[in-house]
Amino acid sequence: MSFWSIFTMSFGFLGIQCGLALQNANVSRILQNFGANVDNLSYFWLAAPLTGMIVQPIIGHYSDRTWCKLGRRRPYFLAGAILASLMLFLMPNASSLSSFMSPLMIGAGILMVMDASINVAMEPFRALVADKLPSEQRTLGFSLQTTMIGIGAVLGAMLPFILKNWFNVSNTPPVLSTDASGAASSWGAAPNVRLAFYIGAIVLISSVLITIFTTNEDPPDGKIQESQKKEAGFLQIFKDFGHIPRTMMQLGIVQFFSWFALFSMWVYMTPGVAEHCYGVTDPNSALYQEAGDWVGVLQAVYNAVAAVYAFALPWIAKKISRKATHAISLLFGALGFCSFMVFRDPKLLIISMVGVGIAWGSILAMPYAMLAGCLPSGKTGIYMGIFNFFITIPQICNGLLGGVMVKHLYGGHAIYALVFSGVLLLIACITVLFVQDKDDPVQFLAFKKKNVVSN
């Protein structure tokens, strides 16, 4: 495929990640505004991995078997984009439904539906690249996806900060109710956060539509269709679990440590930075909201770095192999996370986020480039969905243990969760060296050269 065809095929990821970045950077403080305690935040974030674990294999299985006028993968990410956009409109307005139940519970429910919708849209995009690109272009394809992810994430993470500082939209949450003494007892989402979610919803649906109207899908191979008809429908999902390729299992170990670390960043970065750098723990204070806006900027930085770094990934991987590229990238991420403890000036955390951004750019591209070559024909969607288990399981583990660790192991100081993320990325850096990437052209040529010399 031409470069621009791959570019437009990946463009929908820009909007999907814009919505996801808004969620990652702001949902913790929205839930805190609605009454959540920092010790309990990780439980609310369990909605994301739980829905992903359920939704992605099912969507992958059925997208492998779908063919209609719209294609194979496109019907799914269109439906997911519509639902996710709707949830982005509803999330900051959970307080409007407080007559039915608490805003906190409504917000948690919307978060779960939003995550499910994003997962419906996201998985087929991964499979689409594997469907349409040969091995020598897959690193480029997933790297362009990473670029789109980075651009979308920068936009989503920066929106509240831009609206506050460039357009003077208030970042002070409105008081929803007061107690008997007249003190505020419940708060809503800040106006700049609410408007940012509206803009994100429009960007999400628009970018996905661009991919749908500019990308064609090839009809499935007749022999593959016949073999799929002989399989046992929905139950085949469980049978496919028993035939997971060895490379996929090895990558799963790397993914476990990587995504446990990333989950800590999304959940605890705002309270960690607010306490460590700003000296504030009250989520309803103006200074805490300032810290939250700055965290959005920091998340924009690491996503911007990832977007730029993604352009270099195909070249680096061509020189030193895919897994060596991923190992070095994860090492930079480990150093970035550990440096959070060193810097007290929040501006210096930009340096930390450069390292995290290098790791993030590789995490979004290299495992999928290594995975695609080991998957059997006609099962790209289902195995991409199953591979998501290695992303969701560590997040669930973190969600169950993270709050306990912050409260009892870290003494309530969320900054240590970010330092521990650095340790986990270092472990991931080591484990990736043991992955067998037989589809990597660099490793194949090295193996061939070795055999020629030995013979």
Image (cartoon, rainbow, N blue to C red):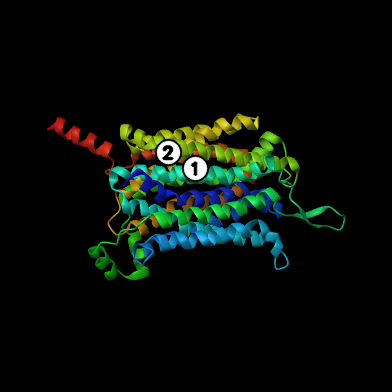
Q: Position of residue 198 (x, y in %)?
A: 62, 54
Quarter location, residue 110: bottom right
Q: Position of residue 306 (x, y in %)?
A: 47, 38
Point out residue 204 in the picture as x, y percentages from the top left corner: 52, 54
First of labels 2, 1 by sequence position: 1
Q: Check disc 2: other Cα within 10 Å, few if <14, some if 14-19, many if 20+.
A: many
Tell me the crowding category of disc 1: few under 14, some 14 to 19, or many 20 or more residues within 10 angstroms, Cα based.
Answer: many
Q: Please report the residue visible at 61 percent of the width from the left and 58 percent of the height from the top.
A: 89
Relative to 160, residue 220 above or below: below
Residue at screen point 38% across, 42% down? 366
In the drawing, what numbered circle is on residue 6?
A: none
Left or right, 13 with reference to 95: left
Q: Is residue 367 left or right of residue 398?
A: left
Residue 310 is marked as: 2
Q: Which mark is residue 150?
A: 1
Query: Element under label 1?
Result: helix
Q: Is residue 64 visible?
A: yes
The residues bearing labels 2 and 1 have C-alpha atoms spaced at a distance of: 9 Å
Residue type indicated by callout 1:
Gly
Q: Are marks 2 and 1 in contact (CB under 8 Å)?
A: yes
Report the number of numbered marks: 2
Instruction: State left or right for residue 412 relative to residue 232.
Output: right
Q: Residue at x 56, y 50 (%)?
A: 401
Residue 286, image quadrant: top right
Q: Position of residue 67 (x, y in %)?
A: 34, 66
Check the picture and name the quadrant holding the C terminus: top left
Secondary structure of the residue carrying tag 2 is helix
